[in-house]
Amino acid sequence: MYEYFSGMITAVTPYYIVIEIQGIGYQVYVANPFRYQVDTNKPKKVYVYQAVRENAITLYGFWNLDEKMLFLKLLNVSGIGPKSALAILANDNHLGLVEAINGENVAYLTKFPGVGKKTAQQIVLDLKGKLDDLNNSENLVGQQELPIKETDLKSGYLTEALAALDALGYTKTETKKITQQLKQMQANSTDEYLRAALKLLMH
């Protein structure tokens, strides 16, 4: 089982990133691909989890070890698969997630794609009081800002952000409700649009 990869990020898509190690490009699914930046000069450490199924071997990646540990705890909940866990992690407010679980805030949890009331209740039942080791972690607060590519168009940022929401499992109906608000923003990167979209979807 892999703990992490250290290599060059060679591609970023709405669904996954590609990290190259010794000439091999690994496709890694992450919660928010646009937190990463294509950089073939500086290696990036990406914590990973390998899921092995009968018809597929899939790699899931994480910004740091705490994010990976939170993902693993979510996977232990009945009804939560890797895709749902990634969608939950895509939101910046991981400490808010911990507080919602400990506070039995089922309504908050059902706002994530693929999480119904029954699954939300199961999350609370399985994880309440078991995330305290993450509750004070600075690694779960905020995310690193990435340099802005001046050549990119803002309309392209928004398009990529909407594609990333689709990859996370949000429906067209859900994203349509917030698209107009996003268009009125003065965001300077796909990452900014995606973070703002996830916050709007949680309200």
Image (spheres, rainbow, N blue to C red):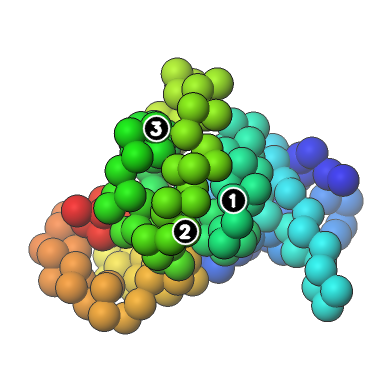
* Residue at the image position 52 percent from the left and 61 percent from the top: 84
Q: CA distance from mark 2 to mark 3?
A: 15 Å
Q: Which mark is residue 115?
A: none
Badge 3 element: helix
> Label 3 amino acid?
Asn
* Residue at the image position 59 percent from the left and 50 percent from the top: 77
* Residue at the image position 55 percent from the left and 29 percent from the top: 130
What residue is disc 2 on?
Answer: 119
User: Residue at the bottom extreme?
Assistant: 172
Say left or right for 131 vs 107. Answer: right
| Position of residue 35 measured from the top left corner of the image (x, y, whole percent) | 48, 48
Residue 23 location, quadrant:
bottom right
Say left or right for 111 vs 7. Answer: left
Residue 186 location, quadrant:
bottom left
> Label 2 amino acid?
Thr
| Position of residue 80 measured from the top left corner of the image (x, y, whole percent) | 57, 58
Q: Decide: marks 2, 3 in contact (CB < 8 A)?
A: no
Q: Is residue 68 visible?
A: yes
First-in-chain label (3 vs 1): 1
Q: Is residue 71 visible?
A: no
> Label 1 amino acid?
Val
First-in-chain label (2 vs 1): 1
* Residue at the image position 32 percent from the left and 59 percent from the top: 111
- Does residue 15 lie above or below 201 as drawn? below
What residue is disc 1 on?
Answer: 77
Q: CA distance from mark 3 to mark 1?
A: 15 Å
The local crowd at label 2, few if under 14, some if 14 to 19, many if 20 or more residues have their Cα within 10 Å, is: some
| Position of residue 172 measured from the top left corner of the image (x, y, whole percent) | 31, 81
Q: Which mark is residue 102?
A: 3
Say left or right for 50 vs 126. Answer: right
